Amino acid sequence: MLRFSFYSLLLILLATACTPAEENTSSVSITSPDGQLALSFQVNEEGVAAYELKRGETFVIPASGLGFSFQDAPALKKGWKINNAATSSKKESWEQPWGEQRMVENNYQEARIDIEETSPPMRKFVLVFRLYDDGLGFRYEFPEQENMGEVVITDEHTEFSLTGDPTCWWIPGDWDIYEHLYNQTKFSEIDALSKRDHPNLAQTYIPENAVNTPVTLKTEAGLYLSFHEANLTDYAGMTLRVNKKDNRFESALVAWADGAKVKQQTPFNTPWRTIQVAEKAGDLIESNIILNLNEPNVLKGDLSWIKPMKYAGIWWEMHLDKSSWDKASGKHGATTENAKRYIDFCAENNISGLLVEGWNTGWERWIGFPDREGVFDFVTPYDDYDLEEVVRYGKEKGVSIIMHHETSAAPRTYDQQLDTAYTLMENLGIHAVKTGYVGPIIPEGERHHGQWMVQHYRRVVEMGAKHQVAIDAHEPIKDTGIRRTYPNMMSREGLRGQEFNAWSSEGGNPTDHLTMVAFTRMLAGPIDYTPGIFNLMMEPYKPDNRVKHTLAHELALYVVIYSPLQMMADLPEHATGQPGMQWVRDVAVDWEQTKVLNGDPGDYVTIARQERGGNRWFIGAITDENPRALSIELDFLDKNKTYRLVVYQDGQDAHWETNPTAMEIEEREVRGGDILDLHLVAGGGAALMLVPM
């Protein structure tokens, strides 16, 4: 088996042409490797700095400001001078241990600009710009210096100026949760404050008219943009304030309980601020800017314990109210007997993992109680759940157990037990855990997306690496590509997930939900959306709830919505005997390469992925509430080969509302370069497998 780490770069062509700027220069410019994007940085006579980004002759980002405000120190917004600037280029190819593609191209032009104040306290920092063919990343680097030691940032003044009034796909800048529906409006119509009242969120805090990232835009010139951040390390999460007067987004950091935004000691770096630029919406999905702006893998040795997999779970039955997490209810789901039933189902259906929720003591007081600290015990099971026996039985059947740690948003309790709980997993041979943080953070005033919690989330990832445990985080901090550095950070929730279909008083997720998610949240990284619901009408448990798309659409999500940990979420009794289960058995979860064949945010998307280490291709296509005819060219296949095509498609009379489970399965032969016509019904989809003959 191959061993993957940062030293397994296959191709490194580093061309460094460091060119010092002229003395007292006031501007620096670089162009992308293909020459299409141009970045310019200027400092005017007052020492006020701005950057701008152009594509050809078109402004992508007009002149936009930079800077900081500090507690007990002057603001750092003007009086700047450029001491030195150097430009360089880099071209390399590096290998992921798992991911949407095996090899990642990292090709950029860089400018490093040394800035110093022209008047006391004469602070220094470096602005680093990296310009790719598909966008820009930049960050501030503060070196250790006599005039700047301990730092409390009260505001970061990074601006993203816009041209015209672009269409935006956004969720509000909530400091505690990302589980909002995406909105499609003009920039001038963004109103995050109207989203404050949310009946289905255990925690939410929206202090101003701001959006969370990634936020996706389509400009009046037809370009697609996405604003986000990369390598969020020991810093506050960034939302983007909506400044309609000046037609721009402005960085708005999530605060500590005491109002500070970031507490640091030099030397330190900010996260990278990222702007992805594309002519086609699908190119945003294919971009690797976020990953490339993170550091290489730091994990050493054999990483075979980090395993992409399909998994089932004692989970959906709780959302259907068939069973419960706590034992006192009298309908406890996490029993030894029930776990073995699920393990048998997994073993019969090529599902290699089983998540068990509600196994440990404390669930009677896990949410809605102010005294949640000290409630959960992460090593002690209920007396009707034999953890060691379940693990043993799973190994006998070839099914790995995925641990579950719900913290009830009391991270200090979790911190106290981290090493003990992860040592238990290591001793049992459990290599994956799903974490959860439902509820307002304790201590009061701290937020899920603030620096205090960013530090906690990183401690969990590092503890997982120490004990060979991969992390699937729910109620997480946003993904900013840290999986490159810590590949055991495998997947996250961080969106309005499948469970909203089972219990939302708003009627579940709308039909266009995932056609927006693919072009917004998924640009950040893997999503644990938990697909695989066959009983779309949820009878007899939740007759007033339902999944608002077709079964073919649901199957297509295994390809469209990427995660290396991909769930088959429904109950075994609902999935057994379903023809679509053959697709679940067949579909891969780790990929050699990924191609977006078509798509537009909120409307439709088609994605093709080749399984890693194999020749099979899988394609998923989904549409919104509108029926849609799509033609896809199989030009990514070997033109000299014939393939067996298996298509799971909407039945002729299928419709998401009236007949969602009608599905046809067709097999035929095709060749590379052929054109396939797909007919998706309202809320429909198609799932395709191509196997060389």
Image: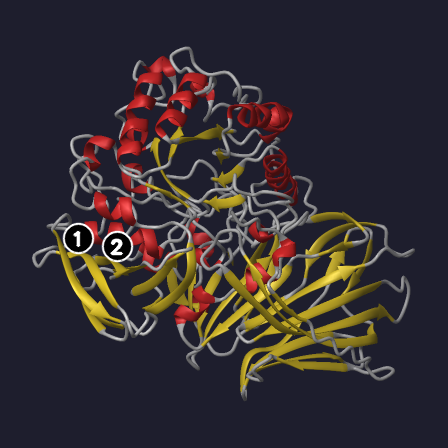
Estimate how packed mark 1 is, as few (under 14), some (14 to 19) or many (20 or more) residues with alpha carbons within 10 Å. Answer: many
Residue found 30% across the figure and 32% down from its top:
347
Amino acid of disc 2: Thr
Residue 295 in sight: no
Image coords of residue 568 (percent x, y)? 31, 40
Image coords of residue 25 (percent x, y)? 82, 83
Residue found 55% across the figure and 76% down from its top:
133
Label 2 residue SS: loop
From the viewer's perspective, is residue 494 above or below residue 370? Answer: below
Calculate the distance from the C-alpha at mark 2 to the C-alpha at mark 1: 8 Å
Image coords of residue 125 (percent x, y)? 80, 64
The quarter of the picture where the C terminus appears is: bottom left
* Residue matched to label 1: 656
From the viewer's perspective, is residue 451 above or below residue 226? Answer: above
The figure's colour scheme reads secondary structure
Whichever of labels 2 and 1 marks the residue nearer the N terminus, that label is 2
**Residue positioned most to the top:** 383
**Residue positioned most to the bottom:** 57
Image coords of residue 196 (percent x, y)? 44, 47
Residue 64 placement: quadrant:
bottom right
Residue found 60% across the figure and 36% down from its top:
460
* Label annotation for residue 446: none
* Image marks 2 and 1: residues in contact by CB distance under 8 Å: yes
Residue 10 in sight: yes
Residue 243 placement: quadrant:
bottom right
Answer left or right for 622 relative to 389.
left
* Pick the front one: 598 or 668: 668
From the viewer's perspective, is residue 518 above or below residue 86? Answer: above
* Label annotation for residue 511: 2
Label 1 residue SS: loop
Residue 567 placement: quadrant:
top left
* Pick the front one: 162 or 14: 14
